[in-house]
Amino acid sequence: MLIKTPKKHELKENTVTAENIYRDRRSLLKKMGFLGAGTLISSATQADVFDLFSKDEVKKFTTKPLTYTKDKSGLDQVLTPENKVTTHNNFYEFGSKKNQPVELSQEFKVDPWQLKISGEVDKPFTLSYDDLFSQFPLEERIYRLRCVEAWSMVIPWLGFSLAQLLKKAQPNSRAKYVAFETLYDPKQMPGQESRRLGGGIKYPYVEGLRIDEAMNPLTLMSVGLYGKTLPPQNGAPIRLVVPWKYGFKSIKSIVGIKLVEKMPATTWNQLAPREYGFYANVNPEVAHPRWSQASERRITSGGLFARNRIETLPFNGYGEEVADLYENMNLRKNY
Amino acid sequence: MALMLSRWMSMKVKTNLLKSLIHVASLLPLCLLYFSALNDELGADPVEAVIHFTGIGAFNLLILTLLVTPLAKKLKQGFLMKVRRLLGLYAFTYAVFHVLNFIAFDLQFNLSLLFDEIIERPYISIGMAAILLLSALAITSINQLKRKMGRHWQKLHNTIYLILLLVGVHFYWSVKSEIIEPSIYIVISLVLLSLRWRKFKR
C-alpha cells in the first residue's frame, strides 16, 4: 500500500472552520450570487435574491456511532476533513451539483431497509437494517477515493469485505459477475423524480464488478465513515467502495446484489460508453476523452491556495493488491 | 431650454445610477467569492466553486451585454446603450478570472499540462479561443482606438456573436451529463442572435 506523507502545507483537521459558520458563509454567498449563478437559472436549492429572508437551514440526518476495529495501516495519510467528505458528493439521486446531496437528502429514511442478495447463489438471503451492522464484524479502512472528475479524497470508511457477504450466499459456478442496484424511490430521491435535478442519467443507478474483483479483500461494503453510520449523501445505509476504481463504481444506498453470468449494464457506461467503461480502473495513462487523468487534486483542508495537485497512480496506488486481476488485459481498450 | 436641460440631467442621472448598480452587482459577488474561497469557506472544493462561479458569471454578463441593444430599441431608452461597454468589460473581467482560476488553482501553474489541455481538450481549446477574441474586443473598446479603427472596429466587434456561440459550446462540452443548464444557455444565445437576423442578412 502506498503511504502519503503529510506535507508542510497540509493543515490539520482542527484548523477547519466550524460547520455552522461554514454553512452560513455558503448560504450568504448563494444569496449574493445573482450575477454569478442565480439569475438565469435558479435551481431548487439555490436561494436567489427573492428568498433572501427565507430559512436555508435543513434538518440534519442523525448518524449513530459504531463499534469497529481501527485501521492502523492508513494512519499516516492526511484525511479529508469530515465536513468535506459529507458536503461534496456526487449522488445524482439527490441532485447533480456537489452541494445538493447534503441539502436534499437529510430526510431520507434508511430504517427499515432491505438488501437482497440473489441470483446465481445457493443460499440467497436478505439483510435488514440492523443486520447491516451486526452480521459481520466492522472494520475501519482508510482508502483513497479518486473521482473520474480528477479530484480525490482520503476517507476512513467502516464496513466489511464484500467477499464475506458473497461467501455467505455461496455463489455457484455460473456466478461470473456481481450486479448492484441503488434504491429507486422518486418520492425520497428528487433526482429520480426530476430530470433537471437528476442530471439526465437513467435510474435506478446500477453498477457491476467481475466476481474476482468483488472477492478481492480490498472491496468494501461500507456502512459508515468517521466512526459513525453513513449520512444519506454518502450512500446510507450501505454502499460499495472499490478504491482502485473511479468513484462512480462505488454505488450508494444499495438494495440489490445479484450474482449473474453475463457482464451487467452499468449506469455511466450506458449514458456515455465512449467515456466510461465497465472496468473504470484508475489509470493515469488513459485520459477521459475530455480531460486528462494524469493528475488529480487531493481535497484536504486548506482553501484556494492549497497546493494539492498530485500525480495519479495506476490503480489509485493499489496496484500491488489488484494489478494481477488484469494480467494480459489491454487496459487501454478495457477502460 | 430648462425642460431640455432637466431631461438631459435625468438621462445622465439614470445612466450613472445604472452604471453604479452594475459596478456594485459585478464587483461585490467577486470580492465575496474570493474572500470565502481564501478562507476555505466555499464548500469542500473551493477551486471548482470559483471556476464555476466566474464562468457562469461571465456568460450571464455576456448575455446581458447582448441584451442591451435590443432592449434599448424596444423600450426606446437610448441611455441604456451607455452601459453596454461597461457590461462587456465586466463579462471580460469575469472571463479573465475564470481562466486565471483554472491556471492558478486547478492546474496550479503546471504549464505543460495547460498546453496539453488546450491542444487535446476541445472544450478548453474553444474556451481559450473565446477569451482571446474577447481580449481583442476589450482592448479595442478604448475610445481613441475605436476612432482610429474606423469601420474596422464594427467588423471586429461583430465577433461577439461568434464568442457567444463558442462560450455556449464550451459550457455544453464541459459538463458530465447535466446538459439542461447549458442547453438553456444555448437557446438564450440563439434567441439573442435571432434578434439580429437583419444585421446578419446584410
Image (spheres, coloured by chain):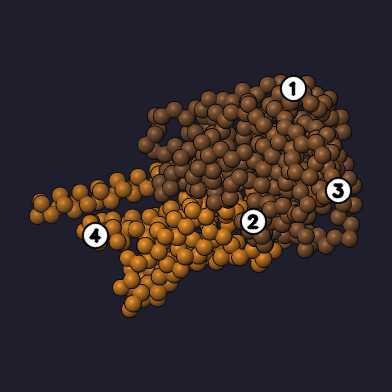
Pointer 1 indicates a residue of which chain? Answer: A
Q: Is residue A13 above or below residue B198?
A: above
User: What amino acid type is highlighted by mark number 3?
Assistant: Ser
Quarter holding the N terminus of chain B is: bottom left
Chain of the residue where label 3 is placed in the rendered structure: A
Position in image of residue A137 (x %, y %): 82, 26
Is mark 1 in CB contact (under 8 Å) with mark 2? Answer: no
Residue at the (67%, 37%) spot, across then down: A255
Q: Position of residue A168 (x, y in %)?
A: 83, 34
Query: Disc number at residue B74?
Result: 4
For marks 2 and 3, the one nearer the N-term is: 3
Label 1–label 3 contact, CB within 8 A? no
Q: Nearer the viewer, mark 3 or mark 4?
A: 3
Spatial distance from mark 1 to mark 2, Cα to Cα?
37 Å
Residue A18 x/y as whole percent: 61, 25
Marks 1 and 2, the one that precedes in the sequence? 1
| Secondary structure of the residue carrying numbered label 4 | helix
Whole-angstrom CA distance, mark 2 to mark 3, is 27 Å
Residue where numbered disc 2 is placed: A270
**Looking at the image, which residue is at 45% across and 60% down?**
B186
Classed neighbour count for the residue bearing mark 4: other residues with Cα under 10 Å, few (<14), some (14–19), many (≥20) = few
